[in-house]
Amino acid sequence: MHDVVVIGAGPGGSAAGYYLAKQGLDVLLLDKAGFPRDKTCGDGLTPRALTVLEDMGLLNELLPAGCRLNRVEIASAAGQTVTAPFPGKNGRPGYTLIVPRLTLDDTLRRHAITHGAQFQSQVRVIGVTANGKGVEVTGKRPGGSFSATARVAIVATGASVPLLQQMGLLKKMPVAALAARAYFEEVKGLTDAMQLSFAGVPLPGYGWIFPLPHGAANIGAGIFPWGWAGRWMSRNTRQAFDSFIQTPQLREMLAGARQVGPVKGYPLRMDFLTAPTYAERTLLVGEAAGLVNPLTGEGIDYALESGKVAAEHLLRLFAATDFSLPRLADYDRLLRQRFQRLFRVCSLTRNLFVNPLLINPMVRLAARRPDLKMVLIRIAFGEQNTLENITVRRVLRRVFAG
Ligand SMILES: Cc1cc2nc3c(=O)[nH]c(=O)nc-3n(C[C@H](O)[C@H](O)[C@H](O)COP(=O)(O)OP(=O)(O)OC[C@H]3O[C@@H](n4cnc5c(N)ncnc54)[C@H](O)[C@@H]3O)c2cc1C
């Protein structure tokens, strides 16, 4: 019997596996994919994500593989832009790094293995059953079936829901954004800015241009098709992507560029505010717990952080040999203390401002008001200290003060 079986070797699962194995626990990490594998993503590592990667001792290894960006540039639907440096507060790096997931996820997975985790690829887990002593994990692999036992399971399966549905943890389809992206080479006009744009994409939604080394870029578009917008919004992300790359700015940047690989789309679960995060002998991390920022769509940072929080919590449970449901529920409390307020403020900010009526005036206002601009950027990039002083009332007061 293993101590912990971790299902899913994305950032959340590999981070959890690393922190547990490093402390000497017997960890089995499983993934349905063969590695290295791609994951449809914008590849953007926020300062929050970089902080965990630094803690894991991986930042220096990843820096040469990525493109370091010092600023964020936001364009309104009307094309007006506003730029700001990354705050770099509270000991966090003042930059972002764009690293293709093919490289990032394999680096994380290998790091977990180097620190003692065992790994098996091409195992699609189809069941996790808890009993008095632990969990039984069953699955399929090429040419046969798979089974393993462990004292605890971590489910880190991302936006893929069949396993959570089979476990009875998701009764209905969770709220999800939809996004599509493609890689391009020889892109013109790339700078040291992470570019976000509301031009050409259905709202609420946005397009992005994330530069990669050697003139390449990850370019994509995402939409939030629920609530009031869900009534009229098309769910066709390919259409949103095509419309984004037809804007004058993108036409200019992509004139003479080469698309590498297909346009790929994937959902993003954003339902952390109501999502389950634990069950008998089981913890959920990353997107399996709905942990994607509801304003920006970033989820690598929250996957890494929740992987670390889950590992640290399990280490306490192993020390006390207490895997009772109330102790597992403490993990949920830890996550909510850390993320609930942030996710609520981000959801409200998106609902209030990312719409055809207000997005242009908001970007115009932010261009005139550096204080407001920095508050909004700190909210979007999850600066905890900013949030401690923030209420929706205060944000509105700041907006209307100018
Ligand atoms: C188009 C797009 C752009 C995005 N851009 C960004 C961005 O720029 N920055 C950012 O921070 N976030 C971004 N995100 C979100 C980010 O990709 C995810 O939130 C993040 O990957 C979540 O990490 P995770 O470890 O929870 O899950 P994942 O990275 O999805 O990993 C889950 C793993 O579980 C495995 N798995 C699933 N089911 C099973 C099973 N039954 N058995 C075994 N293995 C299984 C999968 O193969 C996978 O390897 C984007 C998402 C999309 C769709």
Image (cartoon, rainbow, N blue to C red):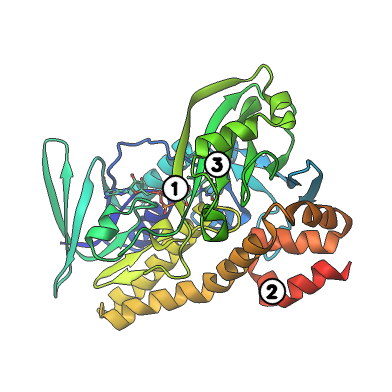
Residue 50 picture location, percent across and down: 58, 53
* Local secondary structure at mark 2: helix
What's the residue type where badge 1 is placed?
A: Pro
Residue 27 in sight from this viewpoint: no
Residue bearing mark 3? 42
Residue behind label 3 places its C-beta within 8 angstroms of ligand 1:
yes
Tag 3: amino acid = Gly
Q: Earlier in the sequence, mark 1 or mark 3?
A: 3
- Tell me if mark 3 has few (under 14), some (14-19) or many (20+) residues whose alpha carbon lies within 10 angstroms of its own: many
- Depth check: 25 or 99 in front? 99
**Number of numbered markers:** 3
- Which quadrant holds the C terminus? bottom right
Q: Is mark 1 within 8 Å of ligand 1?
A: yes
Give the farthest residue toward the bottom: 326
State whether residue 221 is above or below residue 134. Answer: above
Question: Which mark, residue 392?
Answer: 2
Q: Is residue 115 above or below residue 394?
A: above
**In the visual, does 64 lie left or right of 14?**
right
Distance between the alpha carbons at the discs numbered 1 and 3: 12 Å
- Gap between marks 1 and 2, in whole Å? 28 Å
Disc on the earlier residue, 2 or 3: 3
Give the mark toward the camera: 1 or 3.
1
